[in-house]
Image (tube, helix red, strand yellow):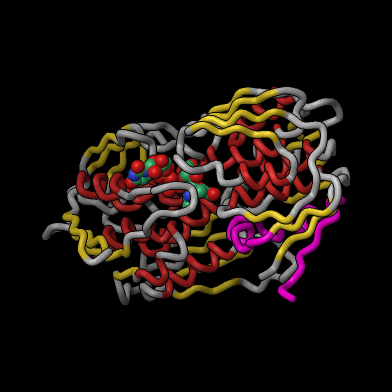
Amino acid sequence: MDKIIIRGGKRLSGTIPISGAKNAALTLIPCALLTEEPLTLRNLPRLADIDGFQHLMTQFGASTTVAGKRPEDFGRVVTMEAPRLTSTVAPYDLVRKMRASILVLGPLLARAGEATVSLPGGCAIGNRPIDLHLKVLEALGAEIELAQGYVRAAAPDGGLPGGDFTFPVVSVGATENALMTAVLANGTSRLFNAAREPEIVDLCNLLVAMGAEIEDIGSGDLTIHGVKRLFGTTYKVMPDRIEAGSYACAAAITGGDVLLEGAKEKEMAATLHALRNIGVICEVEKTGIRITADGPLKPVNLSTAPYPGLATDMQAQLMALLCRAEGTSVLTETIFENRYMHVPELARMGAHIETSGRTAIVHGVDRMTGAEVMATDLRASMSLIIAGLAAEGETQVRRIYHLDRGYERLEEKLAQAGADIERIGDE
Ligand code: EPU
């Protein structure tokens, strides 16, 4: 298996281009199932998860064409077309590799009146149930059955009526499935306490471009008037606010000066607020956000929360940065129950962190040292890369297939900004 080797201590400077957002792309792609016409997505990142999702789409009869871009270009242009659905079943073998596969449930149900999708199971960051996905689809009028590890959703005769639902906790994925279903329902649906993440806004904007009628986009209470059919369109995927935040932490821990090209201030306001409190300078420029760190890093108390709060997907990377702050920080993870898997690995690099339930106390240390480390999820792996950039000596990060799921050409982007980093193939 490939590994990444970093020789720490190099200051990052220059420009890092920000790719299209993985978590937006993963909900925009299944929208191609909602129409007979072609849907073209621009600025799709090249990631293992995106390739996996495109492969899943072929299961339902969707064709995929990648426009002729040079391999060195970022941001692919992909056209997907499903004139006719050839299957409405997402089998275990495809779903188990990628949790986001559950996002085909809504579109298949909306278009074909039925869908059978394997239950995704748990994952490294927690139990991650899908009960809210099922409850909201039921509220929109679907009949739901669970059997043999699969969920089957079916519309009644005459189609889904639509309906109202209040989410007891905010769920990004369940809001996405609900939106992709309600847009083709017979009547009006209202979603209360819906997720407001920028990726949800991106999804709503695409659906509207396809002919959907959605009110109060960007708020937690969405009204969707079902339409008879949706149309093809061309749409550009938003920039990845988590990738941008991750490179901001990388720049900061090396005392660097990096322009995050294409990053948007509003979508990552909570991360920028945290970074500024840590003492990092974040300046909005015409083409992106400049991150500069030239003084000591200050300790802070941070708690993750649904948007517009601090993203749980930034917790591990900020923790790596706070390992080098002058003093003690307290982090609280409120979204997932098991998202401190990076802590023992950071400790192997000299970090001093205590965890108790959902709280982590990070005592800043003067120096960290390179080590062989590995992590069990994407953001945890990124925190090890960030720590490695500032550690003395060599850090070897293993199991980098996690990174390949979510960071497009990571070692190339960091090397361009001056990091001493390389990917080594399996001996
Ligand atoms: N939850 C339930 N029942 C459900 C759905 C969610 O109890 O039916 C709980 C979850 O267990 C969790 C909370 O609700 O405690 C929030 O989960 P959410 O549904 O919002 O997460 P998700 O849609 O499964 C997406 C991102 C994650 C990101 C979370 C939170 C994608 C593909 N994934 O997951 O991204 O952490 O929202 O913002 O969009 C990552 O990119 O590394 C990643 C894990």
Q: Residue at x 77, y 31 (%)?
A: 365
Residue 265 in view in this figure: no
| Residue 150 among those drawn in magenta | no
Camera-nearest residue between 1 and 274: 1
Q: As drawn, is 406 to the left or to the right of 419?
A: left
Q: Residue at x 37, y 57 (%)?
A: 121
Camera-nearest residue between 81 and 121: 121
Q: Residue at x 27, y 60 (%)?
A: 109
Camera-nearest residue between 76 and 23: 23
Q: Position of residue 18 (x, y in %)?
A: 69, 49
Q: Position of residue 253 (x, y in %)?
A: 78, 38
Q: Position of residue 374 (x, y in %)?
A: 65, 55
Q: As drawn, is 22 to the left or to the right of 136?
A: right
Magenta stretch?
A: 398-427
| Residue 405 among those drawn in magenta | yes
Residue 227 in view in this figure: yes
